[in-house]
């Protein structure tokens, strides 16, 4: 008897994160690499409930049409992934290339949703996929100035919706679960939530926690547990790459910055002075440097400081988490979980629901959750 | 009816940590300051089982004879504590000065232990102290080249013992509990452990976790929980002050450095390359700067880095923890706890027993423990 | 025979920079402090042509009315200057307080200029001052959207002028030289330049180089001299204090940021990617932290990076330079120098004229210049 | 008529620095790369007196026998040089491989010197080389506990000499000039200096200035020119690679550390507290990270700090300088310069002679010097 197939459909399938995730998934299947960065391979999370690396079938949409192998070569040249791995999985990568579809163009929102849904259903059928997870790793959308608040899914398309919400809509209609790794709107609309419940699928998000915010989610609790008073916490994120260019747009930037500061208020119980900035520096490519200065005081008010610098490669940090999320969300779907998955807060800057914001508590919650699947 | 009195007896009572703790305890009693840095004042740890600030009676030994108010003035001039607080508690500080005793001189180890014990008993009697905690905040001793392994307390003084062990011996004989905030030997001898059990007192240690290691105890678990591979972790600690001068001695330095790296092995499950160095820079005074470089890799081996710099004031970080430890250890004593207190690992670089080394788990264990007192 | 008196008139006389400069000048006169930070006391610049510390007479304008001794106490409490020095010069400081004047209010620009001029003339006469230097250390003005380009001083007041230009106008009419330590307009108008020439006085500026830009002015030439290719240079300046609040205003901020990047283009011959940001963090008080990331490549394009963090106290860095500038500008005036003094580029972020932008060449030029006075 | 040939003979010809220099020289000759990091290509140093890239003939000694192309591939894999460049010059690299000789073994020092000399003479003859420069880029030798002080070259080999001195001896006997890019002894013996004068050849050294010390040589003068008082300057250098392993040896380390601190005393006129440490972290490979903390005070003693981190690739920084030194030393030889070349202090941590230690003055001196050739 063969194992059930799990489909993973990337929105932004030719972007750095999805390309890295795809190459990595193929390499894991071929046992070419260790699962560095894959939290579902840590002993407390290993579970037969999760689909195996060999059970994942990959596909996706993208506006871009550059072939996946060419994207992988560019990432190898930029030091994001090893050239030898890209070469070793070249055939499998070309096979995935066959599963990618251009993002459909349509005259109306309804038609667009239908076209996306059709692509998803066709993919499921073609590969006899039991369960499908749609994962949004497309570039961040601007914060919408207006969000429809309808409870009634049937009225949803009466207002203009951002692409991430249309994709979530199509996913749910196709019976797929949905993961938003970006700060975009995604499934965060009452009517979409209602639809997810009606269809019986789970969804997860928002905004993968890969760098500065990850560090904040352990340092802020440290200050809190030691009863130290944090006066200011200021940060600068310098990044190139596609996401960097997009975040130079003040609208998109605002969304990201807001989700970056949430962890401080949550962990400390108050908002220190300072803000977190994002600047686009094309030269940095797929790498990102974040610097944070924290000023705090100890006993009787003595002034002290801490700084940190994080030199990370966002795609290499995000890609394994994206695969983890696909595995866990598919298993949750299989286990009958429906609606938002607040138990996945460990992965996100701005998690759905009201869970803890310190990484350690988020981890405990995740371990418990996976144990129930 | 008046509350029970709890005695706190500092070894190194005129040093920076003890002086800061003393000024702070007096200021807390007078409600002159907020309890910044006092973890026993955080809601999950607040407990009627802990002695109140007004119930603490302070005393101590020191080789130095500089009056406490003069020490406090020097710390105020150095920015370690506010001059206005030192001024406000000047009378109470002079009263504590009356309770300090020169470290006794004696011809033999037996006589020294007896003399210390006599000072402790006299202090208890003079102030009708119910329970006494001896807290070692004297400068770090060199790692002893030889440690007596006798199980029999009666044979203990046949071998030369370091001062911290003699003090623990005297404390136990006087029915006092013992806390070691330094990496020195203290109560870590089988015969002393046996004595603590026979007498029925608890003890805690070792080596207060106030700066670089505190940060490591949240960052190392972060890398572990994200399945990132840490290749090297190197650090440099620059510090002045009395402890700095002492740690310039390679022997003492080795003790401290070893306890600083333990958290990495414990959290990661392997020891990354690199070491943690301590350099004495007198000009830095009571302030300390630590810099750490962590090299790690993500998915498919992509190389990344993190750095942090910690500009802390050790005395201002240590002093409130020392008071927290005295309160909790006294309460544990009252509750009948005997022998080592591994539940206090939250406070230490090199905790007694086999507890977790990540700060978050240590916190959970501490909260549970205090709840049982 | 007594030495000639030199007047120093501060615009913003109660601000942090002027207060620190005043306390320091009094302390230098009384030989209470070493001349740390005073470049005119370095052997190559020591010159009998420069007025001695005892020959300086201080006065100034300010909108604020808080007494100078109170300002000095606040700076001492904030760690900007030592309390013992402020106490030691208390009497002399009160004497300077008597020389401070509220910034005049007037119905028209002409009347305001006349009122300022009258204050300056009265000060000169009262103290038999030979030469007067007006030094602008008031808060930075927004970049004016429009600047009058008239060559004719008589038509100057037909257009609205920023306060710094009005002050320069009044200074020149009173026969005083003018130094602008801020990025404000000051004397940088053709008609004011013409007036300075007609009256026969020199002027200097703009924007004191005290922190991040000072470091840039040695690091950028280092990269240039080693033929290394700088790809990006990004910076974040976090500052509190009055200047911080003012620079939070995007208009003023733009002026400062522009002058901060000029040194890169000048030193490297091209503009690397990246920008320099200023954020207001009130909690940091008079202290400023700047962080810069420089990405560059070496032989065959190998990618490398450098970062620096500067934790400086702007007032303590600016104050001695302000006194240096007053001494040198007065000596230049005495030596018959008229119009802009591009030889003082060593002191400024955005120097007048076309001089070198690397610190070392600026120093050589300064030494030569002082030698001719 | 063809141009004169200049020979460059590397001691340590298969090491990272020499391999990178060799690949780079071949790529410059083929116009495949821009001369990033080559200071002799900056306009003020461009001179017809310097041999062109096409006029250099490369050879060398090494204990190691790994073929040069294999070394180049390893450096490409490590990110030190681009794989495409190594591939493009593969044929020329194999040709250089033919010119490399194993370091001769000999029973006595005299025989070893003769064997080296024979290799040098054979290389000169084989390629009709007009002038030969021997460049030491072998791993750093321990500081010799004893150095012969004889003035008489004929008695030199009566005492045991370090390999770098034997190589200098052989070079001079073969009529070649000598450059020491390491802190080893090299030509720094009176008898060797006498020999260089007798033979009529120049020599240069010591210890290439490529990272932390380069930065120090501009920052220390910055503090000095601003009359700021530097209290402490502490640094940690973390490096892997062959040189790292070697410098883990305390003897070699001492040599390097001493030359790293010289610039502070020279620039500031006093030695601040602190030291510069070197730690071997194999995982860092050919890359090096240095962190420095500088504590200083401004006006009236206000305490401030600066930190910097340098993430450099030593081989990519050293290689172009090694080529620059070969070109300039050959031109100096041609111009009749004999003995030490203190004018090349720009390149070294521990320059020969008594020149300035600030980078800017060293540059001026270098420009003047090259102008006389």
Image: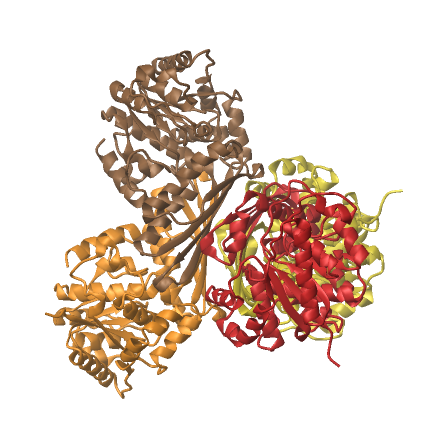
Chain colours: A orange, B brown, C yellow, D red
Quadrant position of the N terminus of chain A in the picture:
bottom left
Q: Nearer the viewer, residue D148 or B372?
A: D148
Tell whether A52 sits left or right of D75: left
Q: Nearer the viewer, residue C318 or B132?
A: B132
Is B226 located above or below residue D1 in the figure? above
Q: Which of C50 and D127 is in front in this view?
A: D127
Farthest residue in the front direction?
A: D107
Whether residue A308 is visible, yes or no, is no
Whether residue D366 is visible, yes or no, is yes
Query: Residue, x 82% and y 49% (percent of image)?
Result: C47
Is D274 located above or below residue C217 in the figure? above
Quadrant position of the C terminus of chain A in the picture:
bottom left
Where is residue A240? Give x, y as percent.
45, 69
Tell whether D334 sits left or right of B194: right
Farthest residue in the left direction?
A: A1
Farthest residue in the right direction?
A: C1
Where is residue D372? Give x, y as percent.
80, 66
């Amino acid at each position: 008897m063969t194992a059930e197939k799990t489909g993973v459909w990337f929105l932004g399938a030719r972007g750095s994160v999805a390309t890295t995730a795809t190459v990595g998934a193929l390499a894991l299947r071929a046992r070419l690499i260790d699962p560095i960065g894959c939290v579902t391979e840590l002993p407390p999370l290993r579970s037969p409930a999760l689909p195996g690396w060999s059970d994942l079938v990959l596909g996706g949409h993208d506006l871009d049409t550059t072939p996946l192998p060419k994207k992988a070569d560019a990432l190898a040249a930029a030091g994001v992934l090893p050239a030898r791995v890209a070469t070793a999985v070249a055939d499998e990568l070309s096979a995935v290339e066959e599963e990618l579809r251009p993002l459909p163009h349509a005259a109306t929102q309804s038609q667009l949703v239908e076209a996306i849904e059709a692509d998803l259903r066709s993919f499921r059928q073609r590969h006899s996929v039991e369960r499908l997870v749609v994962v949004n790793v497309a570039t961040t959308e601007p914060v919408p100035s207006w969000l429809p608040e309808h409870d009634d899914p049937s009225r949803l398309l009466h207002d203009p919706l951002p692409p991430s919400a249309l994709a979530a809509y199509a996913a749910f209609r196709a019976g797929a679960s949905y993961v938003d790794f970006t700060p975009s709107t995604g499934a965060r609309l009452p009517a979409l939530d209602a639809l997810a419940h009606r269809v019986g699928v789970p969804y997860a998000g928002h905004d993968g926690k890969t760098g500065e915010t990850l560090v904040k989610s352990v340092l802020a609790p440290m200050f809190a547990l030691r009863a130290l008073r944090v006066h200011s916490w200021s940060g600068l994120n310098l990044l190139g790459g596609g996401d960097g260019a997009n975040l130079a747009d003040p609208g998109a930037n605002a969304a990201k910055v807001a989700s970056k500061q949430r962890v401080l208020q949550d962990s400390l119980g108050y908002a220190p002075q300072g803000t977190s900035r994002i600047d686009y520096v094309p030269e940095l490519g797929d790498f990102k440097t974040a610097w944070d200065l924290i000023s705090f005081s100890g006993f009787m008010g003595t002034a002290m400081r801490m700084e940190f610098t994080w030199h990370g490669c966002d795609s290499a940090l995000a890609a394994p988490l994206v695969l983890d999320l696909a595995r866990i969300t598919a298993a949750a779907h299989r286990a009958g979980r429906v609606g938002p998955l607040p138990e996945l807060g460990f992965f996100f800057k701005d998690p759905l629901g009201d869970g803890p914001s310190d990484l350690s508590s988020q981890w405990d919650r995740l371990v418990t959750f996976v144990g129930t699947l």
